[in-house]
Structure formats: C-alpha cells, structure tokens
Image (cartoon, helix red, strand yellow):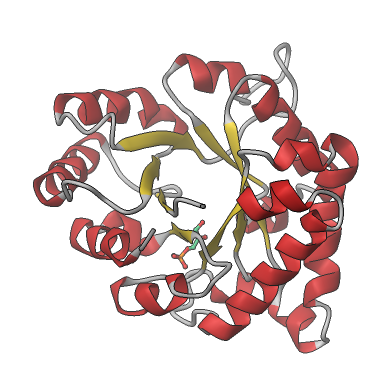
Amino acid sequence: MRRPIVAGNWKMHGSRAENARLIEEIAAGFPERPAAACIVCPPFVYLQEVGRLLRDAELDSQIELGAQDCCAEAQGAYTGEVSAAMLRDVGCTYVIVGHSERRTLYGEDDQLVARKFAAAQSKGLVPILCVGEQLSEREAGLTNQVVGRQLDAVLELCGADAFAGAVIAYEPVWAIGTGRNATPEQAQEVHAFIRGRIGARNARIAAETRILYGGSVKAGNAAELFAMPDVDGGLIGGASLKAEEFLAILGAARS
Ligand code: 13P
C-alpha cells in the first residue's frame, strides 16, 4: 500500500513575506486528514524559516520540509554547496536530486545525480530522484532508454535496496512549466516502465516505491493523473505557489 505524496517544488521563487503568506493560506485550508503526504521544497535560504512557519501554523506534523538539491560531497571546500547533513540539521526530511533544470542548466550528469542520491540517503534524507526525457528524445522513441539510463546510474551505484523508502519523480522535460502535461496514459506507461526496471532487481521494493508525476500538474488535471495505478502523487512546480491550487491538488490524491 503506497501512500501518495504531493510535493511542492517552489524552485527559485518566493520571499520571506510571500512564503509567510503562502503558508498561512495553506494552513487556512489544510484538510484534517489528507490522503497524501505533503512536502514543500523552498529555496535553501528559506528552509529554516519555512520550517518555523509550519511549526507556528501547527502544520509541521502534516507538511514535511524538502530541499531542491544537495551536494554529493559530505563536507569540505565546496564553495556555494549545501550538504545533506546541513539539510537534516535545519529540519529537512526530503531532498530533490537530479531535477531536469539541474541536469540541463547546470550540467549534472547521471553519475553526479546518483552520488547526490547516495549522499542524501547516507544522512537519513529521503531522495526524490527526478528522471525524464526531452521532447526530442520522446519524438525519437527514446523515452524508456533515457529514463532507464537515468535510473540505472542510481541502481548501479546504490543497488535496488536503496529504493526502499525512496521516491522517484517522472518529469518529462517537455511538460515542465509548459502547461502541457503528459496524458494520464503517457505518465502511466513510463511509471510502469520505471517500476518494472526496479522490479527486475527487487520486486518487493518496486511495489513499495512511490513514483510521482511532475510537469504542469494543476487542480484541473491532478485527479485523472493520480488515478493511474502507478502514479503515486505529484511533484508540483508553478501550481504549488498558489495555496488554492496546491490544496486542490492535495485533495485530488486518493489512498
Ligand atoms: P511545473 O509544475 O511548473 O510544470 O513544474 C514541474 C516541476 O518541475 C516540479 O519539479
């Protein structure tokens, strides 16, 4: 039985004032017993304060804190980086690794992402591993090949057992921030492929791994996406910055 997750990736948005307003609005409409686990991932500099806002709103047992990235190294002379241990220290329980914006804009390759996944787990954080193909790759029929390669890098470095408790987010790059979501059938096809890839190594763990869909999820399409058998919730970008939309997406998840 996989409890779905609805996670908000705020990306490089927000300010102290905007974050406070957003958490206040989320708190005002937060359901008594959400069917899904809920996570917010603010920028590094706001993590601690958003953690405090969640505590003040008595939401800290309902909404967990995640970061958007972490360093693959444990500590040392890595100017500008933030370690997994630091993220734990400020109250994070999750961390996104391998987001397509990190991969494409900052040149993160599969091996680096796998090392970040390992670094996160070694400090007790749950990695949310993002995978997904570019439009040209989909059009060339390479979706499974690309997603398979991204997954294999982690399977090879960490083994299938590492996916126990971990989270995967399938985010087709062409669907991110474009308003053009994958159809539920397209998402299901890739999610089933991902589960099968892990299942080939460990069927029990594959059955437990939560696989989120990300890419233009909004209140209007969340329910049909989340209804697919291998879609265990969503990783939400733009719509996670609007309380009403985010809460409606959370409400669309069913256990
Ligand atoms: P959008 O929901 O804005 O398309 O972003 C998805 C995403 O990249 C979440 O990590």
Q: Position of residue 137 (x, y in %)?
A: 78, 79
Figure check: 146 above or below 209: below
**Residue at the top extreme?**
76
**Front position in the image: 239 or 166:** 166
**Front position in the image: 4 or 84:** 4
Q: Position of residue 177 (x, y in %)?
A: 47, 70
Q: Can residue 209 be seen in this snapshot?
A: no
Q: Position of residue 145 (x, y in %)?
A: 86, 71
**Residue at the left extreme?**
28
**Residue at the right extreme?**
156
Q: Can residue 90 be seen in this snapshot?
A: yes
Figure check: 238 above or below 80: below
Residue pictured at 31% horizontal, 67% vertical: 252
Q: Position of residue 142 (x, y in %)?
A: 83, 78
Residue pictured at 15% horizontal, 25% vertical: 56
| Image quarter in which the C terminus is found | bottom left
Residue pictured at 39% horizontal, 43% vertical: 39
Residue 41 quadrant: top left
**Front position in the image: 149 or 135:** 149
Labels in figure, total? 0
**Front position in the image: 136 or 232:** 232
| Apparent side of residue 135 relative to residue 224 in the rendered image (left or right) | right
